[in-house]
Image: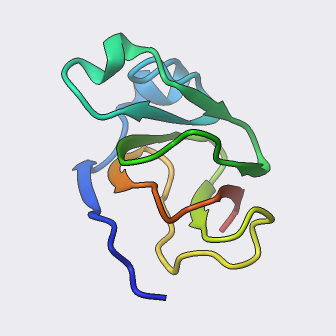
Amino acid sequence: MARTAIRTKLAAAASPAHAAGAWHGCPSGAVCISPRGAGWNNDRPSRVYGQGVSELYGQEGTHFIVNNQTDGWVDRLCYDSYGSTCDAYVQPPGTTWQEILSPMNSIKLSRY
């Protein structure tokens, strides 16, 4: 499938303080999605995900994705709802990306 998303790496890595606690409102050990806009939605993510596969509901347009996972967990965006047809890009822990989520239907969090 042709990829239309924009991928902008906004932060190379979280500081040790971020890894130990919340980062832009995303708790340690989670991946969070926030609507794009000023102030990261006041550091209130619209969705918080733990490990495994989760469907993306109501996440259209461009959003920020914060990977505040620990212990090497990564996330991938997937075209289907089951986490089996995923994008080739893997978001490592401690990074923030800007993505167009419209063509995506799930997010998969796993050990890389």
Asked whether, in this view, residue 45 is left or right of residue 3, the answer is right
Label count reads 0
Front-most of 81 and 45? Answer: 81
Q: Residue at x 61, y 71 (%)?
A: 79
Q: For the view shown, which residue lies furthest in the bottom direction?
A: 1
Asked whether, in this view, residue 59 is left or right of residue 50, the answer is left
Q: How is the image coloured?
A: rainbow
Q: For the view shown, which residue lies furthest in the top direction?
A: 42
Relative height, residue 27 to residue 63 (above, below) = above
Q: Residue at x 49, y 18 (%)?
A: 22
The quarter of the picture where the C terminus appears is bottom right
Q: Residue 105: image x %, image y %?
A: 63, 59
Q: Residue 76: image x %, image y %?
A: 58, 64
Q: Is residue 36 visible?
A: yes
Relative height, residue 46 to residue 36 (above, below) = above
Front-most of 37 and 92? Answer: 37
Q: Residue at x 23, y 28 (%)?
A: 37
Front-most of 96 and 86? Answer: 86
Front-most of 95 and 76? Answer: 76
Q: Residue at x 38, y 15 (%)?
A: 43
Quarter of the figure with residue 63: top left
Asked whether, in this view, residue 96 is left or right of residue 31, the answer is left
Q: For the view shown, which residue lies furthest in the left direction?
A: 38
Q: Is residue 29 visible?
A: no
Quarter of the figure with residue 7: bottom left
Q: Residue 41: image x %, image y %?
A: 34, 18
Relative height, residue 31 to residue 2 (above, below) = above
Q: Residue 12: image x %, image y %?
A: 27, 50
